[in-house]
Amino acid sequence: MSTLEMPSPKSEWRNGFSQPQHLYCDPDVFSRDVDALAKSQWLLIDHESRIARPGDYFTVDVGGESIIIVRDKNNAIHAHYNVCRHRGSRICLEKQGSVRALTCPYHAWTYELSGELKYARHMAQDFATADYSLRPCHVRTFAGLIFINLATNNAPCFDTFITRFRPMLARYDLANAKVAVRQVFPTNANWKLVVENFFECYHCKPAHPTYCSVHDEMKMLAFGAGPGSSDGLASAYLETFAAWERAEKEAGRQTDMFADGPDTPHFQSAGRMPIGKGNVTESLDGKAVAPLIVLDGEYDGAQTGCVFNPVSVLLANSDHAIGFRFNPRGPRATDVEVFWLVARDAIEGVDYDPEQVKALWTITLLEDKTITENNQAGVSSVAYRPGPYSAQESKIAEFGAWYQRLVGLSCQE
């Protein structure tokens, strides 16, 4: 018998190891994953500046669902399923635009921006328009960031979800920011492989020479993928970090950090850390790429990282911020959707160059696309067996446990 037998599709995950093959490849597993994420998590979608004026809208895909995000005439933001209440046609066929009302292109049923049915031709006299509003999904905003949740009834408490990030992001004027540039990196890999790659820096030195050239090497070893991403490494750096923390506290800046364990609903983490090497921001040359977005008026050479949940991440520098959405599109396909924020009154071509703003992470994410697609190709092989994590991959070991809990799977100790 061949020694390269396919692992059993029912094999259980072993704590401290990568996931069994079927969890990275199976269509039924993917459908379950997307449903669990959409209903249990507040998903970071975009920034309010994308719909700056009443009537502005864009559509976003969550699994197989299309959602309309729109600003109404009273400046309130709504999220509607992109499904006409007549016979189910898509309403918004363009990815974004500006409209006075939402009109279905099939039979011209017309809805207010807030979702109420406004007009339907030739219906029976007893037809009640109030019964045929667009189906809403839950939407909330924080610091200009738009989050949605697709739970059928009650969504998780948003205040509880966001509360610990308020002090972490208080000094960043994100509500008065705008999207300078956005980019999508289609990646032929399961969303869990994309998240796992983002949650560890074991790969950074061999795979990301440009990114590593910007950051302190010992910091990368100790905190490469954020708080909790390494297990007891680079203790010497911690002395340097402690001295930096003391100086930051004396300057009145936030230095606290946190990292949730796997037995938590959202697996959140956040921390503010120095970039290192004398760099004032996270850019190719370490120099400023845009006007300040911090309220205390100083390029401070530090970055605040916020993991709202494993598929929603924000990195904030003193002059720009970066939002990441890891959007599962298929069992072996994920869109890494990224937007870069700068100050709202910054003028493109004068105060910032979009190419410079996005340069470092564009290089890094293209490298991530390659290594994650290679990872998926190997995981799909008959030769794949789950492998053990290193000390620099402790965060993804915890992510594995969190994921198993999210979808109700069992674990082999």
Image (cartoon, grey):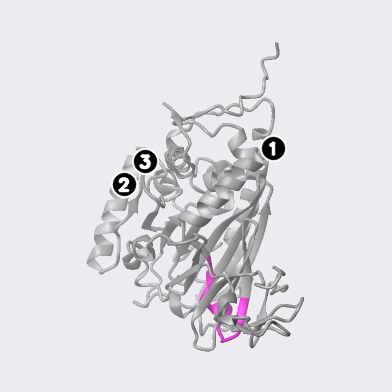
- Where's the C terminus, which quadrant? top left
Q: Is 33 within the magenta?
A: no
Q: Is 53 within the magenta?
A: yes
Q: Where residue 395 sits: x, y (%)?
A: 43, 42
How far apart marks 2 and 3 lie (CA) works out to: 7 Å
Q: Amino acid at mark 1?
A: Ala
As helix, strand or loop, the secondary structure at mark 1 comes to helix
The reply to whether dot 1 and dot 2 touch (C-beta < 8 Å) is no
- Where's the N terminus, which quadrant? top right
Q: Where residue 56 sits: x, y (%)?
A: 61, 82
- Between disc 1 and disc 2, the foreground one is 1
As helix, strand or loop, the secondary structure at mark 2 comes to helix
- Left or right: 146 with respect to 184? left
Q: Which mark is residue 238?
A: 2
The reply to whether dot 2 and dot 3 touch (C-beta < 8 Å) is yes
Please report the bounds of the magenta region as a residue range.
45-57
Q: Is residue 58 visible?
A: yes
Identify the residue position indicated by label 3 in the image: 234
- Between disc 1 and disc 3, the foreground one is 1
Q: Which mark is residue 377?
A: 1
As helix, strand or loop, the secondary structure at mark 3 comes to loop
Name which quarter of the figure residue 186 lies in: bottom right
- Label 2 Cα neighbours within 10 Å, binned few <14 / some 14-19 / many ≥20: some
Name the residue: 41% across, 45% down.
218
Q: Amino acid at mark 3?
A: Ala
- Label 1 Cα neighbours within 10 Å, binned few <14 / some 14-19 / many ≥20: some
How far apart marks 1 and 2 lie (CA) works out to: 37 Å
Name the residue: 56% across, 87% down.
54
